[in-house]
Image: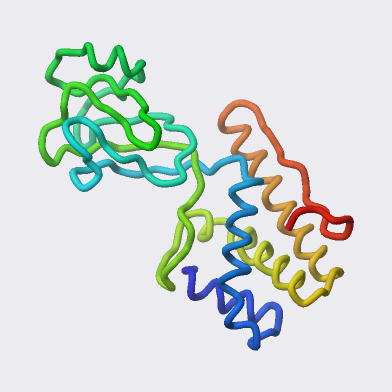
Amino acid sequence: MNYGELKTAVLDDAHRPDLTGQVARFIRECEGMIRRELRAFVQTGTLGESDRVAGGVYTLPPYLLELRAITPADEDADALEQVSLLTVRRYTGVSPLQYAMRGDTIEIRGTPATDAEFDLEYLGHPAPLADDTDENDLLTDHEAIYTQGALFYLYGHTQDLELANSALEIWTDAVNKLNEQIGRKLGGASVSPAYNFGTGGSY
């Protein structure tokens, strides 16, 4: 499913084609709720020349919360060691062996060769959907988190609190189960509290 198909699905499920102009806002609000309540989502990516700022400094993917591993791509090499910024700048070797985090960038030493690539495994959230062809693994694997979250906001807009609470219950159950799965994978579950639409909870 992509963003365009998601918008169609939300309107079809609600039987509200008249809300075509508002559905993008409902999905955007759902994405905010995902970023607040979903612990994180295990993702993979690649750093390449287009991400390089200068030297060994690269821009990290947006919405990255924790970098778990970075490994030179297409090489039989171990993952790079994370060190402090001071330590990484003392490294004088040629082969990339160490890295340090610098906010939304990463500094790798030794300085990678031109067109070098690195495989990433990280925890984070998908970037917001923008174009109708946009898709991501969370939407593909856990469609209900997007559809039910958007329906929650749609029904809040139409002031149908019963349907809003029903959508929220489904959404909360899906997010809690995914949080538990991620917690087990990372060695300790952490489940976010549920929203409560009917008693003034945030939406």
Scheme of image coloration? rainbow
Q: Residue furthest bottom?
A: 18
* Left or right of residue 28, residue 58 in this image: left
Residue at the image position 35 percent from the left and 40 percent from the top: 60
* Left or right of residue 90, residue 101 in this image: right
Q: Quadrant of residue 68?
A: top left
x%, y% of residue 63?
A: 46, 45
Q: Quadrant of residue 43?
A: top left
Q: Nearer the viewer, residue 32 or 79?
A: 32
The image shows residue 84, relative to residue 122, as above or below, that is: above
Residue at the image position 36 percent from the left and 20 percent from the top: 82
x%, y% of residue 13?
A: 68, 78
Q: Residue furthest right?
A: 199
The image shows residue 46, relative to residue 9, as above or below, that is: above
x%, y% of residue 202?
A: 76, 54
Looking at the image, how many numbered discs can be counted on the residues? 0
Residue at the image position 62 percent from the left and 45 percent from the top: 38
Residue at the image position 59 percent from the left and 48 percent from the top: 35
The image shows residue 122, relative to residue 140, as above or below, that is: above
x%, y% of residue 166?
A: 81, 65
Q: Quadrant of the C terminus?
A: bottom right
